[in-house]
Image (cartoon, helix red, strand yellow):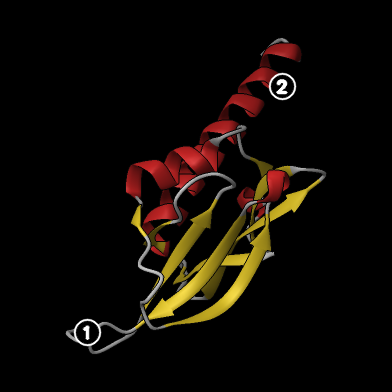
C-alpha cells in the first residue's frame, strides 16, 4: 500500500488515504472511515490523472523515495519528497513510471484528491445500483 496523503478529518483526527493493488486492480483505501472502504478505481484512472496533473520528471532532482508501488503492466508509482531551493518545507510528489512512457510527477495532494473523487463517484454509482436492485 502506498500513502497518497495525510490530512485532518472533520473531527480533527489525523487520517490517511492509500492506494493499493489487489488482483491487478487499483483501489483507494482510507483509514477509519466507513466511506473509505476499499474502492476499485476505473481502469486507466491513474494514467489519466497523472496525464492531467503531471509534468515531466527531472531525473536529476534531489528526492527522497518514501515508498514505491509496483503496478500491473510493469509500471511503478513512487511517493517522493523534494525540497526545492525556494521552498521552506519539502513537498510530496508522486512519480508515475509506465512502461514505454516518460516518467511524470505531480503533487501528491492533487493526485490523491482526483483519485478520491473518482472513488466517490464509483461508490455513489454502486449505491445507486444497489438501491435500484432493491426497488428503491
- Mark on residue 87? 1
Q: Would you place residue 118 above or below residue 21 in this image? A: above
Q: Is residue 46 visible?
A: yes
Q: Quadrant of residue 58?
A: bottom left
Question: Which residue is at a point 43% across and 47% down the rendered structure image?
Answer: 50
Q: Position of residue 41 (x, y in %)?
A: 61, 39
Q: Position of residue 46 (x, y in %)?
A: 53, 44
Mark 1 nearby-residue class (10 Å; few <14, some 14–19, many ≥20):
few
> On the rendered image, what quadrant is the C terminus found in?
top right
Does the residue at mark 1 contact the one at mark 2 (Cβ under 8 Å)?
no
Q: Secondary structure at mark 2?
A: helix
Q: Position of residue 55 (x, y in %)?
A: 32, 54
Q: Position of residue 6 (x, y in %)?
A: 49, 71
Question: Which residue is at a point 57% across and 59% down the rendered structure image?
Answer: 77
Q: Which residue is mark 2?
A: 130
Left or right: 124 as drawn, with respect to 27: left
> On the rendered image, what quadrant is the N terminus found in?
bottom right
**Spatial CA span between label 1 and label 2:** 48 Å
Amino acid at each position: 500500500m502506498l500513502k497518497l496523503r495525510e490530512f485532518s478529518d472533520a473531527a480533527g483526527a489525523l487520517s490517511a488515504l492509500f492506494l493499493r493493488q489487489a488482483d491487478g486492480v487499483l483501489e483507494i483505501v482510507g483509514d477509519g472511515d466507513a466511506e473509505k472502504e476499499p474502492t476499485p478505481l476505473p481502469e486507466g484512472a491513474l494514467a489519466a490523472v497523472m496525464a492531467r496533473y503531471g509534468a515531466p520528471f527531472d531525473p536529476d532532482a534531489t528526492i527522497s523515495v518514501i515508498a514505491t508501488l509496483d503496478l500491473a503492466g510493469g509500471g511503478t508509482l513512487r511517493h517522493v519528497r523534494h525540497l526545492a531551493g525556494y521552498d521552506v518545507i519539502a513537498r510530496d510528489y508522486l512519480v508515475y513510471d509506465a512502461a514505454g512512457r516518460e516518467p511524470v510527477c505531480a503533487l501528491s495532494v492533487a493526485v490523491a484528491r482526483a483519485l478520491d473523487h473518482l472513488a466517490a463517484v464509483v461508490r455513489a454509482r454502486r449505491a445507486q445500483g444497489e438501491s435500484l436492485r432493491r426497488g428503491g
